[in-house]
Amino acid sequence: MNKIFKFLILSLSISVTLYALVVYSFLELGVAVHPGMKSNFQAHPIGIYLHIFASLIALAIGPFQFYEKFRLNKIQVHRLLGKIYLISVLVGGLSGLYMSQYSFGGMISHSGFFTLAILWLATGYKAYHSIKNKNVQAHQYWMFINFALTFAAVTLRTGLGIGFASGTPFEVFYPYLAWLCWVPNLLVALVIIRKDATTLTH
């Protein structure tokens, strides 16, 4: 990834992290979401808070892990942050898996968020398993894929903005965001990996 792309990912990740941190720390639960979703949020506060805050930790940490100079010069910090990141993915993924059944939009939403949670957990495990076996290149591969799924937090909110700006009813466009918030991210990550095989190998 070039520097501009990395900076854009970092900036968007931190912006969404700060926004969500304020909303879910200081405002009533569900106040910032569509009224159709508010009741589900308030009916399952533990699941929502676990998912939101674990995901925000992963989103805030993830971009820094891909800066080569940081990895090489601060290896112990990199490893510590990596552990925190993967624990956050575990908590966020399991709570996301649970909350997917209550997502707004019916089966399209349920299946989209369910699949995202499964892939998030699976790629997190593959990243952990790779580094435990000292396969650094495979670890980098799986972490890159995993963060592309973490970045769904950003693309979901971008999609919400586009949906509202287009004038399309929320109940029409939101179910498809359960897929559109992560499938393009995954495809882009796979293309980047393929082009940069010297750094992120198979």
Image (cartoon, rainbow, N blue to C red):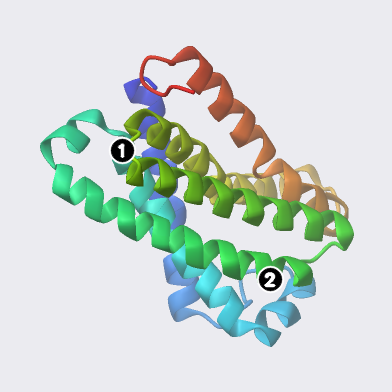
Residue 174 seen in the current view: yes
Residue 20 seen in the current view: no
- The dot on residue 99 is 2
**Residue 3, position as x, y percentages in the image:** 32, 23
The amino acid marked with disc number 2 is Met
The amino acid marked with disc number 1 is Lys
Which image quadrant is residue 97 in? bottom right
Tell me the quadrant of the picture where the N terminus can be found.
Answer: top left
User: In screen coordinates, is 164 left or right of 84?
Assistant: right
Instruction: State the residue position of label 1.
Output: 134
Which residue is depicted at the point 23% across and 46% down? 78
**Residue 56, position as x, y percentages in the image:** 44, 60
Q: Is residue 54 above or below residue 5?
A: below
Image depth: mark 1 or mark 2 in front: 1
Q: Is residue 170 above or below residue 70?
A: below
Which residue is depicted at the point 42% across and 47% down? 129
**Residue 66, position as x, y percentages in the image:** 33, 35
Q: Secondary structure at mark 1?
A: loop
**Alpha-carbon span between mark 1 and mark 2:** 34 Å
